[in-house]
Image (cartoon, grey):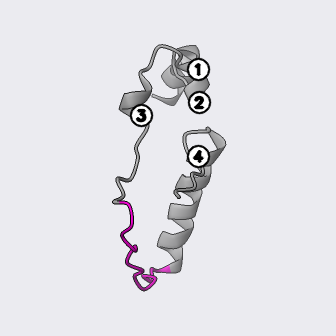
């Protein structure tokens, strides 16, 4: 299976810039916020260290592939 993936590596994409025909409405997600409503701050949830490291690795992979972006809501 791995050799097959390496053989056809040119058909896979790893960044959004390699997918110019993809509609941004499909891949861009926004958090709907109501104006003049104060957000509720919740306590930080603790998780096991091994799970935390896996989550951080996944987020870093998506960040490196430029699938994530920092937004600042007013």
Residue bearing mark 1: 18
Magenta stretch: give its range.
35-48
What x and y, as percent, mark residue 32? 34, 53
Q: What is the C-alpha distance between the residues marked 4 and 2?
A: 13 Å
Q: Which mark is residue 69?
A: 4
Q: Which mark is residue 27?
A: 3
Residue at 33% over, 60% down: 34
Task: Give the camera-side residue of 54 and 42.
Answer: 42
Does residue 44 belong to the magenta stretch? yes
Residue at 43% over, 37% down: 28
Q: Quadrant of the N terminus?
A: top left
Q: What is the C-alpha distance between the residues marked 4 and 3?
A: 12 Å
Task: Give the camera-side residue of 22 and 15.
Answer: 22
Chain-order first, disc 4 or disc 3: 3
Does residue 73 belong to the magenta stretch? no
Chain-order first, disc 4 or disc 2: 2
Residue contact between numbered discs 1 and 2, judged by CB atoms under 8 Å = yes
Chain-order first, disc 4 or disc 1: 1
Mark 1, other Cα within 10 Å: few <14 / some 14–19 / many ≥20: few
Mark 2, other Cα within 10 Å: few <14 / some 14–19 / many ≥20: few
Note whether 39 is above or below 34 in the view shown.
Answer: below
Residue contact between numbered discs 2 and 3, judged by CB atoms under 8 Å = no
Chain-order first, disc 1 or disc 3: 1
Q: Which mark is residue 15?
A: 2
- Label 4 sits on a secondary structure element that is loop
What x and y, as percent, mark residue 29? 40, 43
- The overriding secondary structure of the stretch rendered in magenta is loop
Note whether 21 is above or below 69 in the view shown.
Answer: above
- Label 2 sits on a secondary structure element that is loop
């Amino acid at each position: 299976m791995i050799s097959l993936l390496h053989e056809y590596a040119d058909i896979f994409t790893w960044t959004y810039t390699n997918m110019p025909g993809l509609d941004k409405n499909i891949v861009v997600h926004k958090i709907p916020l109501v104006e003049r409503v104060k957000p509720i701050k919740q306590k930080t949830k603790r998780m096991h260290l091994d799970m935390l490291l896996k989550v951080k690795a996944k987020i870093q992979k998506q960040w490196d592939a430029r699938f994530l972006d920092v937004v600042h809501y007013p």
